[in-house]
Amino acid sequence: MANYLERLKETGFSKRNIGVHKDTDEIVTLEQVEAELHNLQPVNDLSEGKKKELVLAYWNTGGWSDYYHGPDFISLEIALDEVAKDSDLGAEFLKDGARALEMIREDLEKHYIKSKWSR
């Protein structure tokens, strides 16, 4: 399990915003909550506004990966613009980002902190 966390640290992933702390309602990095991951709120439990804030924070700390949406190349700048315009495409990007963060939380639960989530 330690190798899993070390790998995340080596790639810089631990410095990305990955969740919202249950007690403070603040957006936190993995590095900030590494010893208390059980305190991360499930992404699906967040308000739409907090979910949007978290996804944007995640993207801005390196969580965005450029990709093709149909024939269109989507960069971080395009995604941020679509979100700012409150477009349907921006909403789709936010939904995808929220799901990615929930999958990260699930992955951490599965591989790193299985026993800590049940506290």
Image (tube, grey):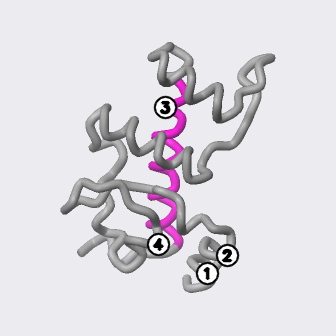
Mark 4 nearby-residue class (10 Å; few <14, some 14–19, many ≥20)? some
Which residue occupies 40% across, 35% down?
Answer: 52
Query: Three-letter amino acid code at disc 2?
Result: Glu
Dot 3 corresponds to which residue?
94
Q: Amino acid at mark 1?
A: Glu
- 31 versus 52 height, above or below: below
- Distance between the alpha carbons at the discs numbered 3 and 4: 23 Å
Q: Which residue is mark 1?
A: 6
Q: Which residue is mark 4?
A: 31
Residue 10 numbered tag: 2
Mark before the other along the chain sequence, 3 or 2: 2
Q: Is residue 98 above or below residue 5?
A: above
Indicate yes or no whether the magenta region holds residue 109: yes
Whether residue 101 sits left or right of residue 79 in the image: it is left
Q: Which residues are magenta?
A: 91-111
Quote the CA–CA distance across marks 1 and 3.
Answer: 29 Å
Q: CA distance from mark 3 to mark 2?
A: 27 Å
Instruction: Please name the residue shown 69% across and 43% down the image.
Output: 65
